[in-house]
Image (cartoon, rainbow, N blue to C red):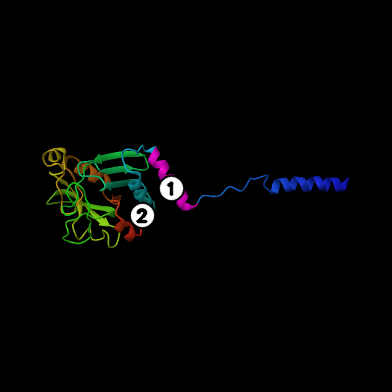
Amino acid sequence: MRTTIFSIAFILLSALTFPIGNASPKKSLSMSERLVNETELIYEQMNLKGLIDFNAFEAAYVGYKKLNNNKNNLLTIIDFNLPSTEKRMYVLDLSKKEVLYVTHVAHGRNSGGNYATSFSNKNGSYQSSLGFYRTAETYNGGNGYSLRLDGLEKGINDLARPRAVVIHGADYCNENFIKSTGRLGRSFGCPALPQELNKPIINTIKDGSLIFIYADKPEYYAMTKVL
């Protein structure tokens, strides 16, 4: 009788301890896999398909998760893969899952015509710079109400402040200019905005939010330490 009880107990314990058939323990996702899933989920929740290229959003969001140490919920993406005739600047509230602004933005005059194809971190290049920036303080200057930017990537955009690369309004950044010239006007390297949106956008993103300027350039990915 005692032997029978022990045999039954052993069988029950074995059934609880070992997987049955082909069952196997569930594999936990790596941190990178979880981030990919999170990125795809937010992209879907915010209905960004058809509005923002996924590759641009994915790179921006990965950097946001890495650099957003002040917990600011805003992320601005500028997609320089697109021509200046398209609205290619997006201001996102990731906490509320809202798209706050979609607008035109100009690139540097030596970066290209309708498309920005060349980028530089050098003073006097009059080219745009790619990568991640943190917004800083506002001021009134030669271009009116403006927002200083601090480039966060050494050798890529870290000279933004000494180069006076700032966000400001411009008369050459609007639909009428596109109709007359076939493209937006160009800046000295600044991401210039339509005058009517300049102040509200600056007041929304100032004081520490992140900006990511994107273009599918192998040189950038070879240099960046963020992505």
* 10 left or right of 120 in image: right
Q: Is residue 104 magenta?
A: no
Q: Which residue is mark 1?
A: 36
Depth check: 138 or 160 in front? 160
Residue 158 at x, y = what percent?
26, 60
Residue 205: image x %, image y %?
27, 46
Q: Label 1: state its secondary structure.
A: helix
Question: In the rendered image, is residue 57 in sight?
Answer: yes
Q: Position of residue 215 (x, y in %)?
A: 28, 51
200 versus 165 height, above or below? above
Which residue shows up at 34% across the image and 49% down it?
Answer: 60
Q: Amino acid at mark 2?
A: Leu
Mark 1 neighbour density, 10 Å: few (under 14) some (14–19) many (20 or more): some
Question: Do the residues under discs 2 and 1 have CB atoms within 8 angstroms?
Answer: no
Q: Mark 2 sits on what residue?
A: 67
Q: Secondary structure at mark 2?
A: helix
Three-letter residue code for mark 1: Val
Identify the magenta region: 30-44
Question: Residue 96 occupies which quadrant of the picture?
Answer: top left
Q: Which is nearer the N-term, disc 2 or disc 1?
A: 1
